[in-house]
Amino acid sequence: MRILNHRWTCLLFAQLCLLANLPAAMADETTPVRFHVVDADSNTPLPCRVYLRSATGTDYHVESADSAGSAVTYDVKRSAESFEKHTTVSAHPFTADLPPGDYTVTVERGKEYRLAKKTITVGTAPVEETIRLQRWVNMAERGWYSGDTHVHRTVAELPNVMLAEDLNVALPLSYWVRDAYTPPAQGDKSVPAKAELIRVDATHVIWPLNTEYELFSVNGKRHTLGAVFVLNQKQPLRLAAPPVAPIAAEARRQGALLDLDKHSWPWSMMLVPVMDVDLFELSNNHIWRTQFFFKQWTIEQLPPGWEIETDGDGFTERGWTDFGLKTYYALLNCGFNMRPTAGTASGVHPVPLGFGRVYVHLPDGFSYDKWMAGLDAGQSFVTTGPMLPATFNGKPAGTTFVHDAPTSVRIEATVLSDTPLESVEIIKNGEIIRTIAPTAQTVVGNHHEQVINETIPIEGTSWIAVRCFSRPPTGDRRRFAHTAPVHITIKDRPLHPRQFETQFLTNLVKQELVRNRGVLSDDELAEYERALQVYRKLHATAIPSR
């Protein structure tokens, strides 16, 4: 990942040719191709993400053709099927010097423009191509602004990349520690950052002071504990982990939020009650634009009877996503009011920034402080593709309603997708209670819409959320969106988790107590004991499993 310097590249290539004593003609066997990307309606130049591939399967990066422009290359590979090689470019023309042949250029810009793909033939004469991106939805006009809460791109790269992806908020994890008992400032991946908002423009901002504890070793020996993020800090953290409770207390003092990262790290289910974690990544950094890769990661945690899809290699992408959703539902049923978020870890994984993102509703316009407050309040939805703005009794997601007697909740939403919708589902206390078939959707302009107007009876304390799935034009992979829940409290009618949920959570913490004995101190193990007591108490009042 670097910003290209075209002149340096050309000079280096020429020098290599001379050193190799190659004929001068061989250095000239490329043709310049110049590209323009514009909005299809306004003809305005757009920043974007570019893929360029030859008919023989060779991938190329591009360069900005304007001295005022920028181009940031990205090249991360996990396997032959799971890789990401692209260039994000500013709203300027860009170029590539290509050998004669056929090429496909694919251009994307975040979630609100349709992908554009074009085949070009390169001969010996210079080529100039214009690619028009069609916007299918404008969420900012509707009061919604997006963010990625798991970012490993450099602060220097982010202005270019955020505009190319039209991502409003980026929270780079500048402090990143991977060894237990090491303060974040001493982490081998840490870069000092100040608590100063970086404004790319009026609606695109970076808060650089955030920390990731991602612990893979204890006392110099390989022993994975897991990850948790501290977001929106005001001061660098001086506390090492474990223990984690003091870190949570300091985060609260600074007005920061705690993000669980992935639900199946070894220590994750201890963190939830001990740290009172704020955010749960419904779309996490194993969900990519490219092929799903982590099929075996934490497969041993898969609880029996949860009907999680797997194949001969382990999790499917659908199964991994469903595992996260059902774990989130179990925690909500246990009374842990975690708000949803999304993170990509773009910078270390083969995934574009903001591929999974969280949209926060700001009806009065964008500000960073209001965006963080809205994220904390759960006035949000998470998406990898469709858009899911919804209201509940006329109130936003994240609202808590309090009633003395049974009531009902009216759900109104217009689900939007640039590809056909597969289903829209209403979730109540972790169960699908209503499915709206895709036959009701209509095509509006250049996208699909499905209007939801459903009334859900509420007999006891409950939570409700809406989710949807869309179908790409080819292949069997799905994109999804999920609202934050609303909570309805009914006097003297508490919500109880189900026994299979509390048994799952209890077992995970018990296993970690066994695994960590002789590795962690008694004081550190006491945090696991505390979490176990919480889950056992919940299990004692849980609803029998069906």
Image (cartoon, rainbow, N blue to C red):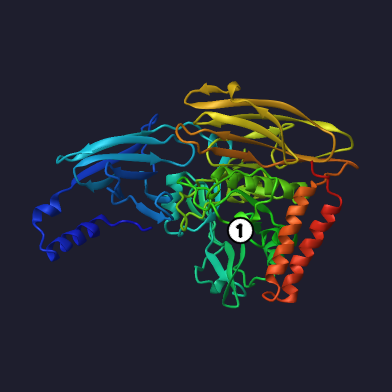
- Residue at 61 percent across and 63 percent down: it is 226
Residue 427 occupies which quadrant of the picture?
Answer: top right
Q: SS at mark 1?
A: strand
Q: In this view, does 285 lie to the left or right of 397?
A: left
Q: Which amino acid does label 1 sit on?
A: Leu
- Report how many numbered discs are placed on residues in the image: 1
In percent of width and height, residue 454 lies at 71, 26
In percent of width and height, residue 185 lies at 55, 72
**211 versus 239 height, above or below:** above
User: Which quadrant of the figure contains the N terminus?
Assistant: bottom left
- Residue at 41 percent across and 51 percent down: it is 83
Visible in this render: residue 230? yes
Which residue extends farthest front? 312
- Residue at 80 percent across and 44 percent down: it is 545
Residue 250 occupies which quadrant of the picture?
Answer: bottom right
Q: Name the residue under label 1.
A: 231
In percent of width and height, residue 120 lies at 26, 36
Q: Is residue 223 left or right of residue 163?
A: right
